[in-house]
Image (tube, grey):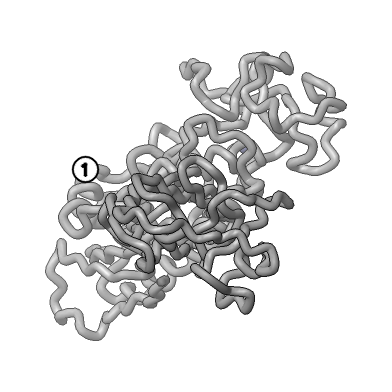
Amino acid sequence: MRVLAIAAFLCASLPAVTVLGQHTLDIVENNGLSENRIDLVIMGDGYTSGEQQDFGADALNAVDHLFGKRPSKQYREFFNIVTISTTSNESGADHPSTSEYADTFYDCAYDCAGLEHLICCDYSTILSVAGAEYPAHDVVLLLVNDQQYGGSGGPVAIASTSPISNDIPFHEFGHTFAGLGDEYDNPYPGFVCEDIYPNVSFTSNRDDLKWNHWVNEDTPLPTPESAAVDNQEPVGAYEGACYQTVGLFRPVHECVMRSLNNDFCAVCTEQMVLSYYGFVEPVDTYSPAQDSHEGVHGDSIDFSVEAVEPTPNTLTYTWDLDGELLSWSDSANLEFFFECVDQGEHQLTVTVSDLTNLVMVDPENLMTMSVSWTITRTDDGPVEDCDDPDAGGDAFINGGLNPGKSGCGCYTIQTRGTLLSSLLALILT
Ligand SMILES: [Zn+2]
């Protein structure tokens, strides 16, 4: 169950003389145990004691933007979000090119590496504070309280509070989470692009294109810019990526990995979703927790799984007994009746899969998870005829009480248009 708690930034409770280095942790959103969630920490630099409320507002604004577009919008339930507020002596950040300096806790500065918009900070202090205040952190976003556009990636995603910096965290999280490469072709002297990015190709050959499953047969390859009907359609192989104008290809005309104020393209979106599943398994918990169960005629057991649901919910649940599919349903629950199986050991398995259309290929099967129980009927009593055609499959699949229930209460299950007439011992509840 999602618990949404807006952080309280109690600036009024701060001491009159702020102790440098004091940090306050607030929970913005808690969607589950950290061990199966992506824990996002939002921190701030250049906020004075009188600007702590500004940090709170800026952090919530950043959350709104981060989770306002695909795929984070659909997978917000996969995240826990906290803020760590820190008081700086002075507001803003350093601007060495104009000899403006601010005494801030994380020592953030523009003009990093001679680039006006590149902000560098004291990463070791940021990460040590994050580690001390919130050891479960997976990813850190630092907001710099300065109205000039700027930011950077690396060990911490950094974005200034300029409104046009809102998309910077998207872009940086593309690097951080999914190992995406930059799709822009401005030169980066000295940088040698390696063939390691899922969204950058060294060839436009259809068979060798990493994302060829997204490319329609009638899309020309390489794809001229004139073939683009909009920024992100069609997916093809557009020349210019990874700081090179020729010889390297990107999936679409414009993606947020190429220029801000865009969405992730289909290829980058797919990689982002897969990266989420590198942190989060589809199933949080299951019940009963024990692997093995015994029972006799007349006994039944309620089985269930609790999964991490995207929004909208694109999960499916399938149940099988001894390898035979029992149902096709969105239900996470199933009641097992022992009288409908013969004496001996049986294997009940539920498989949870995310069928989102944001992902076409899941090579490591990250989006599917199965849970199995061993069920042993110990008595040699009669096996009930659980095949009750009158009950109909739909009633079973839709769950709830089935008015046609009789005998052992087991029903024929209609799955994907097929009427299974095998032993049918399970009723969805
Ligand atoms: Zn992209």
Q: Quadrant of ligand 1?
A: top right
Q: Is residue 228 left or right of residue 16?
A: right
Name the foreground residue: 36 vs 208.
Answer: 36
Q: Residues within 10 Å of mark 1 (few under 14, many from 20)?
A: few
Label 1: which residue? 124
Residue 133 or residue 54, whichever sits in front: 133
Q: Position of residue 102 (x, y in %)?
A: 29, 56
Above-or-below relation of 258 to 302: above
Q: Position of residue 277 (x, y in %)?
A: 45, 44
- Name above or below for residue 88 compared with residue 348: below
Quarter that holds the N terminus: bottom left
210 w.r.t. 370: above or below:
above
Q: Residue at x 64, y 50 (%)?
A: 420
Residue 253 sits above or below residue 137 on the image:
above
* Residue drawn at the location 51% of the way across and 51% of the way down: 319
Residue 157 in view, yes or no: no
Q: Secondary structure at mark 1?
A: helix
Q: Residue at x 35, y 58 (%)?
A: 286
Please, which residue is most extreme toward the bottom here? 12
Picture coordinates of residue 76, whole percent (x, y): 48, 60
Q: Identify the residue at horizontal 28%, vertical 56% (top origin).
A: 294
At which x and y percent is residue 79? 41, 58
**CB at disc 1 and ligand 1 closer than 8 Å:** no
Residue type indicated by callout 1 = Ser
